[in-house]
């Protein structure tokens, strides 16, 4: 028994779409008669290339996809540290300015009180 309509939303794993696009491109280019056998050979070849070169096209595709959504995949961790240090410096400068203004205000209030007492 099948359910004709379902509100279940299945998400494609990251990098999987990229792998399928590559397979589709090769199928269209080669026009094989036995597509399942061609797909098996294609993925076997990809696995061998991944083992030899330590390059995973699925991971690379996931990073490309991720780049368009949040742009964190291609950031260097040293860049993040630099941004954090810069943010801390900006916050410290702002807090220092606020503290100096508060001290200036307190001094002017003290001078006003002293003048009123005289």
Image (tube, rainbow, N blue to C red):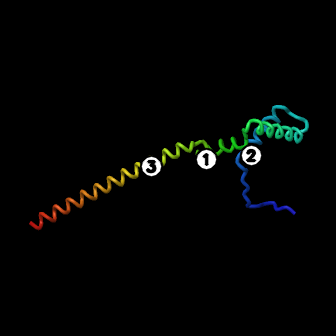
- Furthest-bottom residue in this view: 117
Q: CA distance from mark 3 to mark 1?
A: 23 Å
Determine whether the residue tagged by mark 1 lies in a helix, strand or loop. helix
The residue pinned by badge 2 equals 16
| Left/right of residue 91 with respect to residue 47 in the rendered view | left
Q: Position of residue 8 (x, y in %)?
A: 74, 60
CB atoms at circles 3 and 1 under 8 Å apart? Answer: no
CB atoms at circles 3 and 2 under 8 Å apart? Answer: no
Q: Position of residue 73 (x, y in %)?
A: 61, 44
The residue pinned by badge 1 equals 69
Q: Position of residue 115 (x, y in %)?
A: 12, 63
The residue sitting at 68% across, 45% down in the picture is 62
The residue sitting at 86% across, 41% down in the picture is 40
| Between marks 3 and 2 in the image, the one whose residue lies nearer the viewer | 3
Q: Quadrant of residue 44?
A: top right
Q: Is residue 88 above or below residue 1?
A: above
Chain-order first, disc 2 or disc 1:
2
The residue pinned by badge 3 equals 87
Q: Quadrant of the C terminus?
A: bottom left
Determine whether the residue tagged by mark 2 lies in a helix, strand or loop. helix
The residue sitting at 28% across, 55% down in the picture is 101
- Furthest-left residue in this view: 118
- Which class describes the residues within 10 Å of circle 1: few (<14), some (14-19), or many (20+)? few
| Between marks 3 and 1 in the image, the one whose residue lies nearer the viewer | 3
Q: Nearer the viewer, residue 63 or 4?
A: 63
Number of dots carrying numbers: 3
Q: Quadrant of the N terminus?
A: bottom right
Determine whether the residue tagged by mark 3 lies in a helix, strand or loop. helix
Q: CA distance from mark 3 to mark 2?
A: 37 Å
């Amino acid at each position: 028994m099948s359910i004709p309509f379902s509100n279940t939303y299945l998400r494609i794993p990251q990098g999987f779409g990229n792998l399928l696009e590559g397979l589709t491109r090769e199928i269209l280019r080669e026009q094989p008669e036995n597509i399942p056998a061609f797909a098996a050979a294609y993925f076997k070849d990809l696995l061998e290339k991944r083992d030899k070169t330590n390059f995973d096209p699925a991971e690379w595709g996931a990073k490309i996809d991720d780049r368009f959504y949040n742009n964190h995949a291609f950031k260097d961790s040293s860049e993040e540290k630099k941004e954090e240090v810069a943010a801390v410096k900006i916050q410290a400068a702002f807090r220092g300015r606020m503290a100096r203004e508060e001290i200036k205000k307190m001094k002017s209030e003290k001078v006003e009180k002293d003048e009123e007492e005289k």
